[in-house]
């Protein structure tokens, strides 16, 4: 009986743990974008314009 309960619990937990790396990468990407946005805003404040692409 205990083995059956453990099996059911594992079946419920494992799929949610498998999605965590993707969520972590998405959060990290959003934080990187926010940091770049802030850096561009600070550059514009210091220089009066955005950096050129060339």
Image: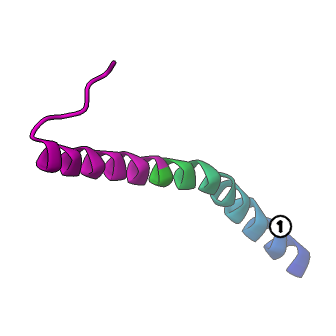
Q: Is residue 36 magenta?
A: yes
> From the viewer's perspective, is residue 45 above or below residue 49?
below
Element type at mark 1 = helix
The range drawn in magenta is 29-54
Q: Which residue is mark 1?
A: 7
Find residue 35 and report its horizontal and vertical position in percent.
35, 53
The x and y percentages for residue 7 are 83, 67
| Residue 16 placement, left or right of 26 | right
Residue 52 rendering spot, x and y as whole percentages: 26, 25
Residue at 49 percent of width and 53 percent of height: 28
Residue in the picture at 46% in, 54% down: 27
**As drawn, which residue projects farthest toward the top?**
54
Tell me where residue 10 sits by quadrant: bottom right
Q: Nearer the viewer, residue 42 or 11?
A: 42
Can residue 1 be seen from the camera position used here? no
The colour mode here is rainbow
Which residue does the image show at 55% across and 49% down from the upper left? 25
Magenta span: helix, strand or loop, mainly? helix
Q: Please say if 4 is above or below 22.
A: below
Q: Quadrant of residue 40?
A: top left
Q: Is residue 6 left or right of residue 35?
A: right
Front-lying residue, 51 or 8: 51
What residue lies at 25% left-to-right and 32% top-to-bottom? 51
């Amino acid at each position: 009986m205990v083995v059956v309960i453990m099996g059911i619990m594992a079946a419920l937990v494992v799929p949610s743990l498998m999605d965590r790396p993707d969520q972590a990468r998405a959060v990290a990407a959003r934080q990187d974008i926010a940091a770049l946005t802030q850096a561009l805003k600070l550059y514009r404040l210091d220089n009066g314009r955005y950096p050129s692409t060339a």
